[in-house]
Amino acid sequence: MRITRLTAAVIEANYDWTIVRLDAEGGLFGLGEAYVGPGVPSIVRELAPLVVGADATRPEVLVRRLRAHTLYAAPGAVWHAIAGIETACLDLLGKHLNTPVCDLLGGAYRPSVPVYADCHAGEALDSLSPLLLPRQPSWAAGRATEASQTSLKHHGWDKSEAPLPTPEDYRRRGEQMAARGFRTLKFDADIPTPFPSDEYDRGLSRAESEYVA
């Protein structure tokens, strides 16, 4: 079963999520997702000459070929792109064999996988460009509210100019997620903060540690 086409699309959300699609002979297609990073969609498309025509029933051969041809650019964003292609190929192979992808990887470890709610205390979804700069997604044009953040301190560097969440905000958001059935919650208590970070070592200052505590 030969791959006939490779395409990539971007979903603008909190980050740019790259969705990879592989079409194959017979009309089947597989979908994969590549992790965020500058230039990932372009890298996926750049790899098309190595992917189109490859045997979709041998994903390991394809992955090793992609890694060999990108040796001097690896790992980084190149491996993000390759991972998206690999998962799309596995999805395609699973459809071809009419079997769950987990069975291709050794079988299911558990019948279901619980998910946690990645919470923030604010009302707006913070959206960051591939360079981790605050931005407004194109689909949200004209929908901006006062709750939108203009300078999110995302895992370091600049201090935030956004309103800082209070303990009450965290409590309220936790109750909302619990009411929706989530049993495990995650909060980034250090984002946003009113303090800049050291770009060299990215260590937390005493002021930041005390703020989080």
Image: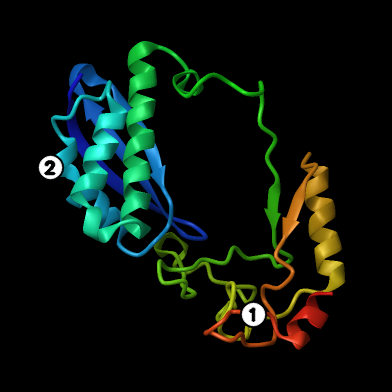
* x and y, in percent, of residue 65 in the image: 21, 39
In the figure, 87 relative to 26: above or below? below
| Residue closer to the observer: 205 or 101 | 205
Q: Is residue 91 left or right of residue 46?
A: right
Q: Mark 1 belongs to which amino acid?
A: Gly
* Image quadrant in which you'd find residue 191: bottom right
Question: Who's the residue at 35% across and 65% down the image?
Answer: 38
What amino acid is labelled 2 in the image? Answer: Pro
Disc ID at residue 141: none
- Residue visible at 13% across and 30% down in the picture: 53
Q: Position of residue 159 (x, y in %)?
A: 62, 86
Q: Which of the marked residues, 1 or 2, is nearer the chain's N terminus?
A: 2
Q: Marks 1 and 2: which is nearer the front?
A: 1
Question: Which residue extends farthest top?
Answer: 98
Determine whether the residue tagged by mark 1 lies in a helix, strand or loop.
loop
Instruction: Count residues near mark 2 (Cα–Cα under 10 Å), then give few for <14, some for 14-19, many for 20+.
Output: few
Write down the residue under mark 2.
49
Q: Residue at x 71, y 85 (%)?
A: 205
Coloration mode: rainbow
**Residue displayed at 65% across by 81% down:** 162
Quadrant where the N terminus sits is top left
Q: How far apart in space, not on screen, are marks 1 and 2 (Cα)?
A: 43 Å
The reply, left or right, for residue 14 in relation to residue 35 is right
Residue 109 appears left or right of 178: left
Tell me the number on the disc at residue 203: 1
Residue neighbourhood size for the residue with mark 1, other residues' Cα within 10 Å, grouped as few (<14), some (14–19), many (≥20): few
Picture quarter with the C terminus:
bottom right
